């Protein structure tokens, strides 16, 4: 296993180690294509991994929030496990990987918000040349709970889905400018990290999308009147497989997210998975248990 060392030794990967892991996976599996989709506010690469050559794609995205780092590692484990099964002409969660991939491609964006990832892990210095800006935004808040990008915008509030409603909710909660969490920015898609994801979805034929956050062992599956009818059936199958509960987000979590935007924009299925239980950031020692609980769900997302 490429990434098992850090999990066994009870520490988390930083951004460079995540990138090194992606490079190692690419070197190990010739059919795994890796690309840079763009750069973050401070210039960090935002990577994408693709398995398969079909034009029809299934999208997996994580690392939206700085303190939800296990979502990034979860997707790297998924990539590695599926690639191993494909290379060995073997099985992924009891089904032939080659058969599972037929007629589709897997696209994985493990780290949408690399700056927030580094800030929450290492402190304000993770923002590099924007360190002082982050310090001003942070104030007396706990840096370990940082969710936003280096500009203080919460990426999962920055999508064009009920944005005026979300802005009003934020203001009612006293969030009127850059913040460690929950500030959606001046306008939808104001952030390069958000644009990278929306431009990818507009360019590619994405059959459905799964976004990963933490925590709560919950699945969010609908948004507004463009939610496809099959979303509910898919969500029920995912819930039965994972043991996660189907939920409806409330408050500022009910608009502005990637899942919301994808459904509203394309009238195609999209889901948010809140992985694990506990307090963010989740203990990396629990990552493999989280993955094992979700592996069949990953499989189902490929065949439904």
Image (cartoon, rainbow, N blue to C red):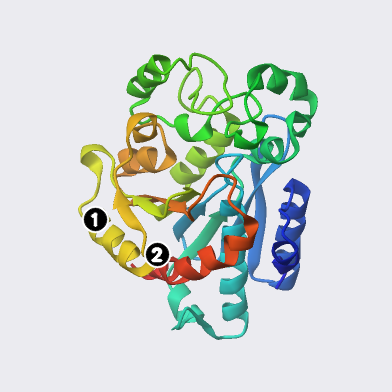
Question: Percent x, y for residue 232?
Answer: 24, 55
> Which element type, helix, strand or loop, lies under badge 1?
helix
Is residue 52 visible in the rendered structure shown here? no
Rendered position, 292 above or below 119:
below
Q: Which mark is residue 167?
A: none
Q: Residue at x 58, y 35 (%)?
A: 193
Q: Residue at x 68, y 72 (%)?
A: 29
Rendered position, 227 above or below 59:
above
Rendered position, 46 above or below 95:
above
Question: Percent x, y for residue 177?
Answer: 53, 15
Which quadrant would residue 303 be assigned to in this image?
A: bottom left
- The quadrant in which the N terminus is found is bottom right
Crowding at label 2, few (<14), some or many (≥20) Cα neighbours within 10 Å?
A: some
Question: Percent x, y for residue 129?
Answer: 79, 25
Rendered position, 35 above or below 255:
below
Disc with the residue nearer the chain's start (2 vs 1): 1
Q: Which mark is residue 301?
A: 2
Q: Nearer the viewer, residue 275 or 79?
A: 275
- The quadrant in which the C terminus is found is bottom left
Question: Percent x, y for residue 122?
Answer: 75, 38
Q: Residue at x 53, y 46 (%)?
A: 279
Crowding at label 1, few (<14), some or many (≥20) Cα neighbours within 10 Å?
A: some
Classify residue 271 as left or right of residue 15: left
> Which element type, helix, strand or loop, lies under badge 2?
helix
Is residue 303 visible in the rendered structure shown here? yes
- CB atoms of marks 2 and 1 within 8 Å: no
Give the total number of marks visible in the rendering: 2
Q: Residue furthest bottom?
A: 89
Q: Circle 1 sits on which residue?
A: 232
Compute the Cα span from label 2 to label 1.
13 Å
Which quadrant would residue 74 be assigned to in this image?
A: bottom right
């Amino acid at each position: 296993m490429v990434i098992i060392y850090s999990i066994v030794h009870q520490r988390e990967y930083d951004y460079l180690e995540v990138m090194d892991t992606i490079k190692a996976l690419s070197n190990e599996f010739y059919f795994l294509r890796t690309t840079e989709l763009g750069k973050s506010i401070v210039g960090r690469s935002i990577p994408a991994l693709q398995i398969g050559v079909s034009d029809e794609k299934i999208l997996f995205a994580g690392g939206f929030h700085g303190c939800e780092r296990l979502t990034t590692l979860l997707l790297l484990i998924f990539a590695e496990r599926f690639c191993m099964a494909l290379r060995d002409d073997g099985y992924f969660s009891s089904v032939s990987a080659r058969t599972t991939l037929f007629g589709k491609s897997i696209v994985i964006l493990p780290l949408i918000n690399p700056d927030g990832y580094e800030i929450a892990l290492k402190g304000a210095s993770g923002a590099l040349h924007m360190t002082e800006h982050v310090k001003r935004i942070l104030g007396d808040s706990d840096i370990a709970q940082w969710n936003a990008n280096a500009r203080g915008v919460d990426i999962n509030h920055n999508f064009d889905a009920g944005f005026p409603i979300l802005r009003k909710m934020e203001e009612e909660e006293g969030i009127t400018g850059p913040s460690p969490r929950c500030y959606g920015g001046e306008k939808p898609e104001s952030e390069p990290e958000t644009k990278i994801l929306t431009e990818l979805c507009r360019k590619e034929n994405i059959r459905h999308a799964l976004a990963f956050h933490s925590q709560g062992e919950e699945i969010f599956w609908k948004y507004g009147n463009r939610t496809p009818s099959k979303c509910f059936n898919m969500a029920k199958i995912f819930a039965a497989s994972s043991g996660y509960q189907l939920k409806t987000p409330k408050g500022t979590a009910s608009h502005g997210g990637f899942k919301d935007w994808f459904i509203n924009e394309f009238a195609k299925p999209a889901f948010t998975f809140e992985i694990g239980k506990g307090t963010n950031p989740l203990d990396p020692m629990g990552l493999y248990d989280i993955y094992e609980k979700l592996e069949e769900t990953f499989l189902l997302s490929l065949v439904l």
